[in-house]
Amino acid sequence: MAEVLRSVGLDVGTTTTQLIVSELTIENKSSAFTVPEMTIAQRRILYKSPVHFTPLLDDAHVNGDAIRQIVTAEYEKAGITRESVDTGAMIITGETSRKENAQAVLAALSDFAGEFVVATAGPDLESILAARGAGAVDYSAKTGKTVLHMDIGGGTSNLALIEDGRITGTGCLNVGGRLLKLDEAGNITYVSPVLSGLTDLRIGQHATPEKIAQLAQRLAQALEMAAGLTEPTRLLDCLTTRETVGALPPMKAEVISFSGGVADCIKDEHPPLSFGDIGPALGSAIRRSKLCQGEYVLGQETIRATVIGAGCHSAQLSGSTVYHRNVIFPLKNLPVVTVSPSEQEQPNLPDLIRSRFAAQDTAAVLALPGFSPAEYPRIVTLAEKIAQSIPDGPVYLTLEPDMAKALGQALALRMPPGRPLLCLDRLRLEDGSYLDVGAPVGPALPVVIKTLILATH
C-alpha cells in the first residue's frame, strides 16, 4: 500500500519569499519475492503561495518577524499545521543568505516549519533544487541532451550541468537582477558590494538606460563565459561566488535552460523600471547574448523553480536493507564524516575515525563511500573496527551498496544493547554535508542531504 508524506518548501530569496505545500506518494516498486525498493512515485503540489517580496529591515538585515508572519499566514491559507508536516526544505538563497542575521532567521523558521522541514542554504543545493524544480533534469532525462540550467535570481545565478538526467556539476555567480536597485525616478538606492570594480554607478546617482544596459551586458558576458561560449577573463573570477570551490570550469551543453525571476524578463520585454532593479535589462541582455543564439528553453517553472525543488525534490529515500535500534526520529543536522575507500583499508582505521569524530561537538554520521565488500568476513572486520572507534553516544552510518542491514547487525553484536545504532544504504555523502533522517516509511527512511553554508561577506 502506498504511503503519503506532506512536504513544505520555503524559499527566502534575495527578492522574493515563496512557500509551497506538496504531497509525496511512496510506493514499493519491487515484487513480493525481492528486497523492497521504496521510491517517491508521485509528487503533487497542493498549494502555491503568492510571490512575496522578501522583507528587509535594511540592506544588511532580513526582517525575521515579517517573514514569520508570511509563513504563518500561508500555513493558514494552505490549511496545514506544523504537526502535519512530514518533510521538505526551507532555504535562504542568494544575497539574502549573506545578510548579517540570516542564521538567526534560519533557526527561527526551522523551528516554526515543523518536525522534519529543514533549514538549508548553499549554492550547490540551490542549483540542484532549481534544476529539478524547473524541469531541466526531467528534460535532460527525456531527451538525452546535456543541459546547462541557469537559475537567475535577484542576487545570484545558480548553475547546474545535467547529463542524461544526472546533475554532474554545479556553480554559482554573483549575477542577478537586484544587485542594483532604483527608485521610481531611476535614482540608485542600492549597489551590491559584488559590483565593486565593475561599474562606476553609486547610490544617489541617476542611472541612465545606457549605464544600466552596459552593466547588464557585463553580467550576461560572465554567464556566457560560465557556459563555455566565450573565453573566460578576470570578469568570471570576479563574479564567481566564494562558496564555489576553485575556478568555475566551462559548463558546455547542447541546451541552456533558464529559471528564476530574471528568466521571465528573457522571454518578454519589460519597461526598465518595472521592478525597481536591473532585472529587465539583464533579461534583455541575455536574450541578445550568445546564451540564446543556440538551443535554449525556459523552465516549466521560472520564479518558483527553487521553492518547488525544495518542496517536491529535496527529500529522498534510503535503501530498504537498513538497520536501526533505539533511535529517536527525526534526526536533524547531523554532520557527515567521510572515510575514503583507501582509508578504509588502513590498519589505523579506528584511530583515523576517532580523530575525525573528536573534531565534532555533536553526534555525527560516518559515511563509507565506495565500500563494497565481496564477502561477509570483511563486513565483520569493519564492524569490529567501527565498534572500537566511536566510544560514546549513538552510531550513525551510511553506505552506498545494499549492505546496511548486514553491517548494522554485525555492529549490534559488538556494542552495548541500549546504544542507539542506525545504518543506512544507497546514500552517497560528502564532507561538509549534513543529514536529516525521518521516521521509517515502510522499510526505508526519508532523508534530506544538505549543506548549511552561510557566507560571511
Image (cartoon, rainbow, N blue to C red):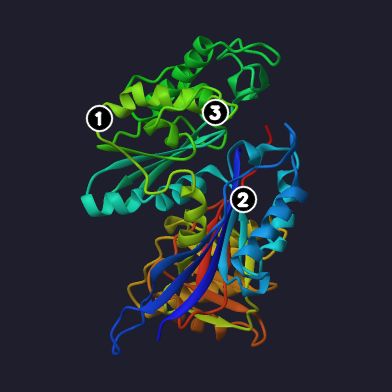
- Residue holding disc 2: 452
Q: Residue at x 46, y 83 (%)?
A: 442
| Tag nearer the camera, 2 or 1 | 1
**Which SS class for mark 1?**
loop
Percent x, y of residue 286: 39, 26
In the rendered view, would you say 166 is above or below 217?
Answer: below
Within 10 Å of disc 2 (Cα), the crowding (few <14, some 14-19, many 20+) is some
Percent x, y of residue 143: 22, 50
Rendered-image quadrant of the N terminus: bottom left
Q: Which of the two discs, 2 and 3, labels the residue nearer the N terminus?
A: 3
Q: Which of the two discs, 3 and 1, labels the residue nearer the N terminus?
A: 3
In the rendered view, would you say 66 is above or below 188?
Answer: below
- Under mark 1, the amino acid is Gly
- Under mark 3, the amino acid is Ser
Q: Residue at x 51, y 58 (%)?
A: 339
- Under mark 2, the amino acid is Leu
Identify the disc placed on residue 294.
1
Within 10 Å of disc 3 (Cα), the crowding (few <14, some 14-19, many 20+) is few
Residue 338 seen in render: no
In the rendered view, would you say 205 is above or below 352?
Answer: above
**Which SS class for mark 2?**
loop
Q: Residue at x 48, y 26 (%)?
A: 280
- Residue holding disc 3: 274
